[in-house]
Amino acid sequence: MTDTTLTFALMDPPYENARTATAFRLLDIAARRGYKINVFAYEGAVSLSFSRQTAHANAVHGRDAAAEDHPLPKEWIAALMAEARAAGGALDWVNCGLCVDERGVGEAIDGTRRGTPADFWNFAVASNNTLVIPTK
Amino acid sequence: MKNRYLLIASRDPYASKDIDHCYELAANLRDEGRVVTLFLVQNGVLPARPSDLSGRLTALAERGVTVLADDFSLAERGIDGTRLAAGISPAPLDVVVDQLAAGVRTIWH
């Protein structure tokens, strides 16, 4: 466990942009170091933790859902939370409540919570640093 | 760390003209005496290949900006990290986390 706290603001929805993959790579590095990590998911990023994401088959290539092993962001988030805990850190994931309601993605995985932009402000004030990854 | 800046350039000049502003910001900050790292990631690494557009990055390096290209993004695009334009070095994404943890002012573009 270190006393380093980093905050990230994410805005992209799943499967849309390489920014999401880069953001998860950054979170992975910080988690492995045992940092305390805060994520404020805003706009489309609130769908990253939607619990009803479902892996699908790939009929074109003749693979069933198990063989396709389609990646689901909700599983990446759960894995990052476990990784952070194992390294002595923590990942606190907050979804913007209004953004959640707009998109009907209120069913989020365990370990995430609903919040407001005020949470982002509080995160930033209490962090060593904050990185905002905007959509454009 | 108020004197240190990390600019993360995720766009390439072939598709986005506003990357010019990111490069200009790096140059201006450096000219004001700041310590500046320009970290290229995703398609931002494309001009790291020796080309007509890589000259701007080389010029930034000559000006004193540390120009780094994400090794993962390079590999994804089949760009050989040992054959980048002058002044540009491959680097792991850990550099970004290092600088965030150190309190370096960081801007994503």
Image (spheres, grey):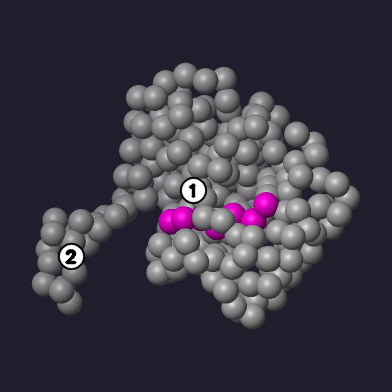
Residue topped by disc 2: A57
Q: Position of residue B9 (x, y in %)?
A: 63, 60
Q: Is residue A133 magenta?
A: no
| Mark 2: amino acid | Ala
Q: Looking at this view, name the residue that lies furthest to the right.
A: B32
Residue A42, given in percent of the width and then of the height, sits at 57, 49
Query: Looking at the image, can residue B55 be seen?
Result: yes
Q: Nearer the viewer, residue A52 or A14?
A: A14
One can see residue A115 in this view = no
Q: Residues within 10 Å of mark 2 (few under 14, many from 20)?
A: some
Chain under disc 2: A
Q: Is residue A71 left or right of residue B17?
A: left
Q: Position of residue A36 (x, y in %)?
A: 52, 27
Q: Which mark is residue B92?
A: 1
- Picture quarter with the C terminus of chain A: bottom right
Q: Chain of mark 1?
A: B
Residue A77 is situated, as x and y percent measured from the top left of the image, at 39, 42
Q: Residue at x 33, y 38 (%)?
A: A79
Residue range in magenta is B66-72
Q: Is residue B39 above or below residue B45?
A: above
Label 1 residue SS: loop
Q: Mark 2, mark 1: which one is toward the viewer?
A: 1
Main secondary structure of the magenta stretch: strand
**Mark carried by residue A14:** none
Along the viewing direction, whichever of B98 and B58 lies nearer the viewer:
B58
- The amino acid type of the residue labelled 1 equals Pro
User: Element under label 2?
Assistant: loop
Rendered residue at 56%/56% (across/down): B89
Q: CA distance from mark 2 to mark 1?
A: 34 Å
- As rendered, which of A41 and B26 lies closer to the eye? B26
B91 horizontally vs B39: left or right: left
